[in-house]
Amino acid sequence: MSKSNDRTLRFYNEVLGLDRLHYGIWQPDDELTYDNLKKAQIRYEDFLIENIPEGVKTVLDVGCGTGVLSKKLLEAGYAVEGLSPDINQKKVFTENVKAEFHHSTFDKFEANKKYDCLIMSESAQYIKLHRLFENARQSLKQDGYLMICDYFRLEDASGIHGKSGHYFHIFKEQMQESGFKLITERDITDSVTKTLDIAKYFADRAILAADIGTEKIRRKHPHLSKFILWLFRNKIDKVNRQMELIDSKAFKQNKTYRFFLLQNIS
Ligand SMILES: C[S@@+](CC[C@H](N)C(=O)[O-])C[C@H]1O[C@@H](n2cnc3c(N)ncnc32)[C@H](O)[C@@H]1O
């Protein structure tokens, strides 16, 4: 797994104490609270499940993380399997989800069956584009569905945001050439970025708290103090880069967060 991917996952796990590894869908009036962040992440999972077309029975959760979505899919009656190249996720998934797990990247995955639906929830960005569509076609039944929910880089993206995610225009070009039909596309950028705002909110206070350096704050705000340790574990220039990473304005200038439902008509 790449260093930046590892950093993201550690951020969610160690700093926020969350077992969910995705942004979430916020409501416009939601206050920036830890509870609302958790609710937003659950709302996002429900949104994905609601958008699974009728008739789908078998699902491969590609880049399944800790298996939270897979578990929900099982409970909703789908025959689900998980896939991740990460050895820790393999352990967590197999302990918590009663479903088959494939320990592999999707790029190298050779399916021994054809699925009705593939879900890539914030995992498409890690899969090489030419492998993504080709392997999705190979792994899906005729008329099967590919669901992708992720962020993409805009063409003129710069700074730290210009370093991750597929270029949106290239993704769209390849999608059009791929033998998939576009069923749904939704721009949900504005609904996800409060996750960055809450991280920024914590970070600003963490910096302030680190300045003051009182133990009282650490006891009263355990998440906050974990954040301080995370933020300051490296040198100060790194801190500045992390701060840009959680700046929702910079995110919106450089990225777009999209939901896609595609159908394999090749
Ligand atoms: C940000 S997490 C998202 C996890 C989960 N889908 C969710 O929504 O919470 C990214 C996931 O993609 C996986 N991943 C990284 N590189 C991958 C690849 N080449 N093929 C498939 N999955 C990959 C990671 O191990 C991780 O499970």
Image (spheres, helix red, strand yellow):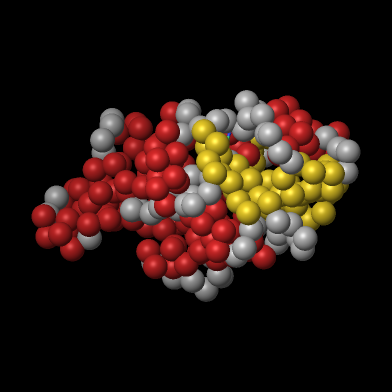
State whether residue 137 is above or below residue 122.
Answer: above
Q: Determine the residue positioned at 12% across, 60% down.
A: 216
Q: Residue furthest right?
A: 266
Q: Determine the residue positioned at 15% across, 52% down.
A: 212
Give left or right: position of 183 versus 139: right
Q: Quadrant of the C terminus?
A: top right
The location of residue 175, given as percent across then percent down, is 80, 38
The location of residue 46, given as percent across then percent down, is 59, 65
State whether residue 44 is above or below residue 255.
Answer: below
Q: Nearer the viewer, residue 265 or 78?
A: 78
Give left or right: position of 258 versus 74: right
Q: Is residue 171 visible?
A: no
Q: Is residue 38 visible?
A: yes
Give left or right: position of 105 versus 242: right
Q: Nearer the viewer, residue 161 or 19?
A: 19
The location of residue 14, given as percent across then percent down, is 32, 46
Give left or right: position of 178 versus 158: right
Q: Determine the residue positioned at 42% across, 33% down.
A: 87
Q: Residue furthest bottom?
A: 29
Q: Nearer the viewer, residue 219 or 197?
A: 219
The image quadrant that residue 152 belongs to is top right
The location of residue 74, given as percent across then percent down, is 57, 59
State whether residue 140 is above or below residue 215.
Answer: above
Q: Determine the residue positioned at 45% across, 46% down.
A: 93
The image quadrant that residue 238 belongs to is top left
Q: Across the whole image, how many numbered discs are drawn on residues?
A: 0
